[in-house]
């Protein structure tokens, strides 16, 4: 099979032919139909995670995996309802199954777990072995290029916004911000409209094309942050919403600048959720944080149940996508575009032998939310 593998940090992936992997008795061999390309794949290659993850080279990246069942291990129970040909996605957190977080259903934050593409082989290959209990079968078939991103870009902001909803800061008299309008941000805007009970949704970003798409996805207002001070942004927020402060915010970027800006605009008792990981530090003033009784949530990926909920929305046509299908041969070129922030929406590797439902050109789905 073809696979794109990482042999060292800060080097292009090697595109090569390797043996199709065997599966254990409790694994399923998935023929990859679509594999999302994530900025965290670039960060993996650039060494961002090397202090937290000690992988053994070579690594096959790719944690956004959608495909079809090719083979089923002999000890996979019939109750799993997995058969050859089924369309499936892989939930990305593979926990040990016995720790406290796994017992709560949060395998993605298991201290002893791992994630495909960051150790176990990922989706930048034509076949990938997956533990059967990490697979979700689709009732109604979807396009590979729209399905794969839902396992990370399309579910990570969903979990983050659920935290805002649980904190009680969303509602018809509230203003919610989405920082970032690319892969995660485009989905976050849609979930903000679906889950915020009528809150006014404002998206903040530096790219006009991405802001335009965010408006098409349902954002009430869009603010370009390029070259603007906090006072400029506050004045623009007042002009658009009548309010100078944010009740809630989700940061899909995770740069030091977006975190400082978000907290600088946060109202008393406001809640901020970080899901993006562009930067490496959090630097916010302590007294305003304490005196304002702000709440700050980290939100990492999503669990199996979160992904099931997102897939249910997608199966009902309630999620829109901005997708750039990618050929296997063009992986390294598009990793470089990801590195420079020059991809609109989500890039997805679509394998030639995987019966794609679209040509290799940019697709914009305009299903109504």
Image (cartoon, grey):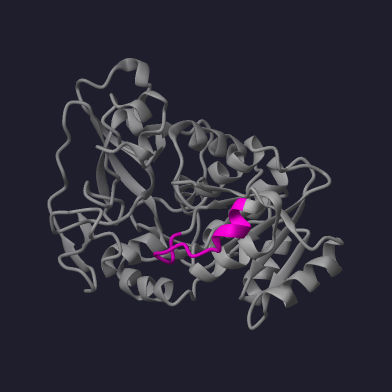
Q: Does residue 47 appear in this view?
A: yes
**What is the quadrant of the N terminus in the image?**
bottom left
Q: Position of residue 228 (x, y in %)?
A: 67, 80
Residue at (55%, 45%) from the top-left corner? 160
Give the extent of the magenta segment: 277-290
Dominant secondary structure of the magenta stretch? Answer: loop
Residue 186 in sight: no
Q: Residue 61: percent from the left, percent from the top?
A: 28, 57
Residue extending furthest toward the bottom? 227
Residue 26 higher or lower than 294, as above or below: above
Q: Is residue 15 left or right of residue 140?
A: left
Residue at 56% x, 63% y is 285
Q: Residue 178: percent from the left, percent from the top?
A: 64, 58
**Residue 209: x percent and y percent?**
64, 74
Please report the residue visible at 36 percent of the width from the left and 16 percent of the height from the top.
Answer: 79
Q: How many marks?
A: 0
The relative height of residue 75 versus residue 14 in the rendered view (above or below) is above
Q: Is residue 117 magenta?
A: no
Judged left or right of residue 125, residue 313 is right
Q: Nearer the viewer, residue 346 or 360?
A: 346
- 308 or 230, nearer to the observer: 230
The residue closer to the viewer here, 366 or 61, is 61
Left or right: residue 339 compared with residue 343: left
Quarter occupied by residue 52: bottom left
Q: Residue at x 38, y 21 (%)?
A: 81
């Amino acid at each position: 099979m073809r696979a794109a593998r990482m042999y060292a940090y800060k080097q292009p992936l090697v595109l090569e032919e390797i043996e199709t992997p065997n599966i254990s008795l409790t694994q399923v061999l998935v023929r990859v139909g679509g594999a999302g390309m994530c900025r965290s794949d670039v960060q993996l290659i650039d060494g961002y995670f090397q202090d937290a993850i000690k992988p053994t080279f070579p690594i096959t990246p790719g944690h956004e995996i959608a495909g079809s069942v090719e083979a089923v291990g002999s000890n996979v129970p019939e109750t799993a309802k997995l058969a050859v040909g089924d369309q499936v996605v892989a939930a990305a957190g593979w926990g040990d199954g016995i720790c406290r977080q796994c017992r709560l259903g949060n395998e993605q934050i298991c201290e002893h777990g791992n994630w495909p593409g960051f150790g176990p082989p990922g989706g930048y290959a034509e076949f990938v072995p997956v533990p059967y209990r990490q697979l979700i079968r689709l009732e109604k078939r979807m396009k590979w290029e729209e399905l794969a991103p839902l396992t990370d870009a399309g579910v990570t902001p969903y979990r983050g916004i659920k935290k805002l909803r649980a904190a009680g800061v969303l509602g018809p008299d509230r203003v919610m911000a989405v920082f970032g309008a690319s892969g995660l941000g485009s989905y976050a805007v849609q979930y903000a409209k679906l889950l915020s009970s009528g809150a006014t949704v404002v998206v903040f970003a530096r790219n006009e094309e991405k802001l335009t798409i965010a408006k098409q996805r349902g954002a009430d207002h869009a603010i370009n942050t390029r070259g603007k001070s906090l006072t400029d942004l506050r004045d623009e927020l007042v002009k658009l919403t009548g309010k100078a402060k944010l009740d809630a915010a989700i940061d899909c970027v995770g740069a030091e600048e977006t975190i400082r800006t978000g907290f600088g605009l946060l109202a008393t008792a406001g809640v901020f959720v970080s899901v993006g990981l562009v930067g490496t530090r959090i630097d916010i003033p302590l007294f305003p944080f304490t005196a304002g009784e702000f709440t700050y949530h980290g939100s990492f990926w999503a669990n199996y149940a979160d992904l099931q909920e997102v897939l249910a929305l997608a199966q009902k046509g309630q999620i829109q996508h901005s997708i750039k299908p990618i050929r296997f041969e063009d992986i390294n070129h598009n990793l470089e575009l990801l590195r420079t922030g020059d991809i609109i929406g989500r890039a997805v590797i679509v394998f030639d032998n995987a019966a794609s439902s679209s040509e290799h050109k940019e697709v914009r789905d305009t299903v109504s939310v």
